[in-house]
Amino acid sequence: MLNRWTNAMRKDYRSHKYLYIMIFPVLLYYIIFQYAPMYGAIIAFKDFHVAKGIVDSSWVGLKHFEDFFNSHYVWRLIENTLLLNVYQLLFVFPAPILFALLLNELIGPWFKRIVQTVTYLPHFISLIVIGGMITQFVSRDGFITDLLVWLGMERTALLGHPEYFRPIYIISEIWQSVGWSSIIYLAAISGVNPELYEASRMDGAGRIKQMWHVTLPGISSIIVILLILKIGSMMDIGFEKIILLYNPNTYITADVINTFVYRRGLTSSMEFSYATAVGLFQSSINFILLVFANWFSRKVSETSLW
């Protein structure tokens, strides 16, 4: 059996030698920078000291996990992380799909290119600059605050109030990602068979019905795959923008697991083992969610990751 498999691999290598050569650097990258560092996850179960190294650091078992779950803010952190991810799933995830569907209906190519260019731009702006822009826009004298005051709201610095943090974060995420994320859906739409549109027109379907019965089913597999991947990261969220926007006044709604670990594990305390333990907990939950989402998708549809 082993000899048969080896011979098949050799034959396939001789037939596709240059493809194997091209993929080798990619495999090497993942082995060196993705899989090899996984050995370091063992420090989540040790009292790691840089001077002692991973091997000589003392074993403490589940102590760091217990410290995290016994901390005063643990459930608030989990709640904030999950809520921001749920809001992204409800509002940020569908936004590029809707945008791609609407953009596909534009007839004038020059206007379509202008719209695409304008909506792609926020993706290329540095996150530091984005954070500064948002802070200025929603400051006491920012133009968004001026607009809200004109609509009847009391003038205040919006980022100083915890109830405004989540809407600001989600709306800014849509603004940043809607254009760039729509590229993959536009590419999928371009692959839909034109004969399906012709047949639907002959049946009397208008643009809305074509969008609903032809375009959406044509890109449903892409949507499902990206949705599975999104569900597989529900316990994780990019904390860089949160760090740029939050402050002690908004910790109650803005502080997530990653920002807490950053403060606790990588700044003043330098508790590397603690930070690794929390990261391992997040990764484990994300893996379970990913497997469940893939299993559920395979049960209800023909699309899944594996």
Image (cartoon, rainbow, N blue to C red):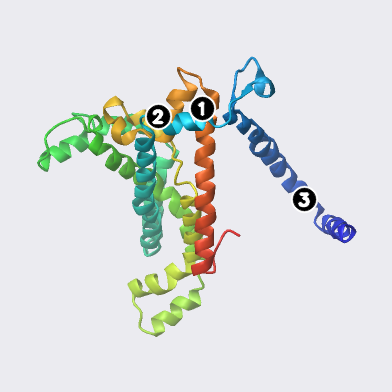
- Whole-percent x and y of residue 101? 39, 62
Q: Relative to residue 187, is residue 43 drawn left or right?
A: right
- Whole-percent x and y of residue 38? 64, 36
Of callouts 1 and 2, the N-terminal one: 2
Q: Amino acid at mark 3?
A: Tyr
Q: Which residue sits at x=64%, y=38%?
A: 34
Q: Which residue sits at x=37%, y=52%?
A: 115
| Numbered tag placed on residue 274 in the rendering | 1
For discs 1 and 2, the disc positioned in front in the rendered view: 2
Residue found at the very far top of the displayed protein:
51
| Quarter of the rendering containing residue 6 | bottom right
Of callouts 2 and 3, the N-terminal one: 3
Between the residue at mark 1 and the residue at mark 2, the CA separation in whole angstroms equals 12 Å
Above or below residue 231? Residue 215 is below
Between the residue at mark 3 and the residue at mark 1, the CA separation in whole angstroms equals 40 Å
| Numbered tag placed on residue 20 in the rendering | 3
Q: Identify the residue position indicated by label 2 in the image.
A: 71
Q: Amino acid at mark 1?
A: Tyr
Q: Please, what secondary structure does the residue beneath circle 2 have? A: loop
Judge by depth and name the residue closer to the eye, 278 or 37.
278
Above or below residue 299? Residue 285 is above
| Quarter of the rendering containing residue 208 | bottom left
Above or below residue 245? Residue 284 is below
Q: Amino acid at mark 2?
A: Ser
